Image (spheres, grey):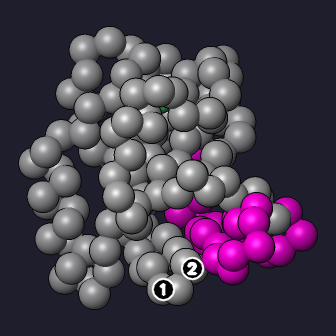
Amino acid sequence: MRVFENDRSVPGTVWTRRSEKPGGFTFARSEYETLLELAEGAYPREACGLMLGTHEDGFITVHSVQPTRNLATADDHFDLDPGDIVRLDRTARERNQQIVAVWHSHPDADGKPSREDLLGQWGGVAQVIVSVWDGGAGEVWVWS
Ligand SMILES: [Zn+2]
């Protein structure tokens, strides 16, 4: 697992890898705001979705943050709707992009992935977790 740290000195929202290997994870500012709004909007339930973009030589660029339905019945779980995954994968390919991350929120918890999150991690796809405290988005954690 690699952890990215937000580099607040760079305009926009850029994470750099916390290791000697080069790589980064970049959002357009508008998409970062979309992510926070979707996470806050679902509170106190977990929100979830996918990120579409490009992945080259360890550098991931998010072009669009997309919500999916959450099929989980418990508030503190997420289960991506398979139909939404198929639809968004098609959208990505039509744009010459790919699914670069799975994202979800952690209501009233930090962004550390749970055991279930780690077991469910997709190969080659980053995992982004937004913590939401009292309905307000806090930290965003990126793992890959
Ligand atoms: Zn989680």
Residue 37 visible somewhere in the drawing: no
Q: Residues within 10 Å of mark 2 (few under 14, many from 20)?
A: some
Q: Per the image, is 62 magenta?
A: no
**Badge 1 amino acid:** Glu
* Residue drawn at x 37%, y 22% as measured from the top left: 77
Q: Hey, which residue is sitting farthest right in the picture? A: 9
The relative height of residue 72 versus residue 55 in the rendered view (above or below) is: above
Tag count in the figure?
Answer: 2
**In the image, the residue with mark 1 has its CB under 8 Å from the nearest atom of ligand 1:** no
The relative height of residue 122 versus residue 40 in the rendered view (above or below) is: below
* Residue drawn at x 49%, y 70% as measured from the top left: 62
**In the image, the residue with mark 2 has its CB under 8 Å from the nearest atom of ligand 1:** no
Decide which of 19, 95 is in the foreground and name it: 19
Task: Name which quarter of the figure residue 116 lies in.
Answer: top left
Q: Hey, which residue is sitting farthest top in the picture? A: 74
Q: Position of residue 24 (x, y in %)?
A: 65, 73
Residue position marked by numbered label 1 in the rendering: 56
Task: Name which quarter of the figure residue 37 lies in.
Answer: top right
Q: Position of residue 114 (x, y in %)?
A: 51, 27
Position of 143 with respect to 80 (left or right) is right
Find out whether the residues at labels 2 and 1 contact each other: C-beta distance under 8 Å.
yes
Q: Tell me how far mark 2 sits from mark 1, CA to CA.
A: 5 Å
Q: Per the image, is 34 magenta?
A: yes
Decide which of 63, 54 is in the foreground and name it: 54
* Residue drawn at x 10%, y 48% as measured from the top left: 83
Q: Position of residue 102 (x, y in %)?
A: 39, 51
Position of 133 with respect to 8 (left or right) is left
Secondary structure at numbered mark 1: strand
Magenta stretch, residue numbers: 8-36
* Residue drawn at x 69%, y 58% as measured from the top left: 4
Residue position marked by numbered label 2 in the rendering: 59
Position of 119 with respect to 44 (left or right) is left
